[in-house]
Amino acid sequence: MNPLNNQAFLSILLQSHVPMFIAWGTAGTLFFNDAAQPLFGGPSAIGQPAQKVFAENWDTLAPVFDQVRQGKPVNIPNIIFSLNRHGYAETVSFTFSCIPILNEAGEAGMLVTATENINPLNIDQRKQAEDAVRQSELRFRELADSMPQIVWTATADGYTDYYNKQWYLLIGNENEFGDNSFLKHIHPDDQARCIETWHNVVRSGEPYEIEYRFKVKYPVEGYQWFLVRALPIKNDSGQIIKWYGTCTDIDEVKRIEHTLRESEERFRLLVDSAPVMVWMSDPQMQITFFNKRWLEFTGRGMEQELWDGWKEGILPDDLKTGLVAYEEAFEARRDFEVEFRLKRHDGQYRWIVCNGIPRYSYNGAFLGYIGTSIDIHERKTIRLELEKRVAERTHEISLKNTALEETTRKLTAINHQLELRNEELRQSEERYLRMTNEVEDYAIILLSREGYIENWNKGAEKIKGYTADETIGKHFRLFYTHTDQQQGLAERLIEEAKVNGKSTYEGWRVRKDGSTLWAYTVITALHDDKNDIIGFSKVTRDLTQKKQAEDRLKMYAEQLEQKNMELERSNTELSSFSYVASHDLQEPLRKIQAFGNLIQSRDVAHLSETSKDYFNRMVKAAIRMQNLIDSLLEFSRTTTARKNFEPTDLNALLDEVRKELAHRIEEKKAVIESSHLPKLTIIPFQFRQLLSNLISNSLKYSKSDTTPVIEINATFVKAAAMNEKAALPGKDYFRFTVADNGIGFEQEYAEKVFDLFQRLHGRNEYSGSGIGLAICKKIVENHHGFMRAESEPGRGARFFFFIPAK
């Protein structure tokens, strides 16, 4: 009889709380009760041979088992096993009581009872260990209950045996464990996936991580997304003894991800509806996006253009310089603008202006660049042709009549102003079109089909003064003046955009604080795949400063015209004065001198000494008055005389001045030293007077006990080396120096000496009218230059005047 076929024997064996097992046959095939399972590591050892299961102790057990099979009962003391108790490995000693079993056929086996050898000290240690485990379990549960997320545990076979308080608050019911305790709260669409993955990881022992929806009862009943994680806890033998898991609410994260996806889709709709080409790059300078306008312009697909594909469309002559500008801006993380020629879908290369600005994430991480590209081919071609024609016309007029040079210069200046104005308009248009890459400078609003605000960017908040919460859901007529609202302007613009695809308007708008701004608005219709209008994009640019600048420019033009009229009247009055001074004022003076001289020569014997002194004073005063009038006329002619510029050798001009002043030079025994002077296009008679006045001034204020030495030289000075405040930027000059070793003057009078009628010495000391240096300064200004002086008392004076090289 096989003992395994005896029901009574099996019942005793299985119900026993003492570890018991049967080893049957020569192989020692094992069968055991539940109490013996810890000895064998679980039920999987049933049916296995004893030698395999007891491999570590077989050397001890084999000879004893042979004796038992021969019919001898035997006790085997101190058989050592490593058992898993309370999650910890423990070494335990057993005594095996072995009884032989025989059936009718004479087959032998044995019944073994395993009795644990308990040491009193080990009992205390085990009790302490059990208490420690209970305390640890208690601390774990207290900690788990204090956590804001759900915490749970499961046995090694995956049976859920614990949930913290957060589970019962949000989801579960008290005293429910196992698979059904959580499965019934999971969304029906997620249940199969959840239970399948959980059973898989229980079998594999891998960490568990999955997202699915739980039906929560707090704060609002409904399904919410959770991230569920679990880690297996293993003993020293590598066996799983426990699973610890958490459930984290990620519903808000899921909603944010959904919102971000919707935002990205809206962004693509917006840039695809923009009237400019838009592109984006990543932090490695690779282009990752082109909008619909770019692809339509180039006639190429997105895959062809991405990464470095876009470079194929740029004219090779422009590619290198464009890449340099892009790379330099990229390294510095700054805005850039570059012009290049891009091949259109019809094969024509057209001029494009490209602008880019760096992009950053919410936490300041650099994301790459976003930019726009605008076709400026016609405008650039017209500007180049206009510049060419103006230059040709200017040259033709200069060759025909040099007398019109001044007029030509004025026309050129006016043309330059027009070019600057044209450039301002071009830049104004470009700034308007760069609505996607200068977001804070543009109000970009998404409108519904009826004109109600659905989206509100930072630029709109900056320009209009409203926050998004204050405007979303309201009609955009809110920003229009009361008059425009009464006239239905906002509604008319919406209708125009529906019919024509877009509408534009420039006028006054109203901010939140009631102030007004001058704005330019573009409303563009947005279409779905069926070409039905689904809403509108509204881009507004604040042009208040531009409007104010135009108004100021208009006012300045009116003021300039008024000043020109006043200048014409002044010139007319000055000409009248010159006529009076040269004729009417000098005639009485000539008579005073003539009659005074007659009286002095004829009646001198009849005059007292006092009368002679009076007549002398009268004649000298008349002479001084005539000299003063002559000087004033001379100064007047430097302002009103016709300015005929001629190429002139200044060395020859200086020789003429020397001859004119030969008598005074000889009288003073002066030495005039000069270096080689350049040839310049000047007004000859004025420049001769300039040199004559400066040399005469040095002769007049020479020292009585020192031979006068006057040095004259000219030096070419490049614009980069000019340190003079009065110099025009980028202009090359000739610097002329007239230096002497005369009496000099205090430096504080260096500017005063050029004023009319300014004298630093009395008439009795030095003769003169005080106009000579003022005439010099005026002549230099007529040649578009400037003049200054340096001096020190007793050490002479140096006069510098600067004449443009061209």
Image (cartoon, rainbow, N blue to C red):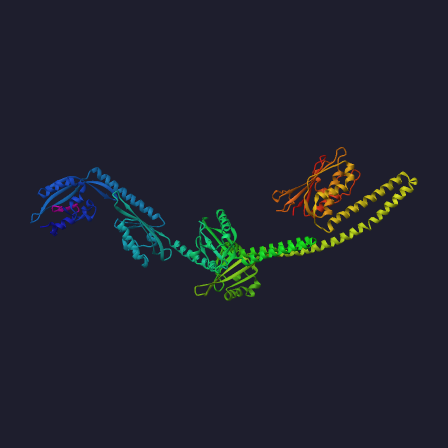
Q: Is residue 559 magenta?
A: no
Q: Position of residue 170 (x, y in %)?
A: 34, 54
Towards the viewer: 536 or 620:
620
Residue 200 seen in the current view: yes
Taking 229 as reference, is 659 left or right? right
Q: Number of numbered discs present?
A: 0
The residue drawn where x is 10% and y is 42% is 68
Taking 365 as reference, is 543 left or right? right
Taking 745 as reference, is 158 left or right? left
The residue drawn where x is 22% and y is 38% is 122
Q: Position of residue 598 (x, y in %)?
A: 89, 44
Q: Is residue 22 magenta?
A: yes
For the record, the magenta segment spans 17-27
Towards the viewer: 264 or 773:
773
Q: Position of residue 178 (x, y in %)?
A: 27, 53
Residue that sits furthest to the top in the current view: 705
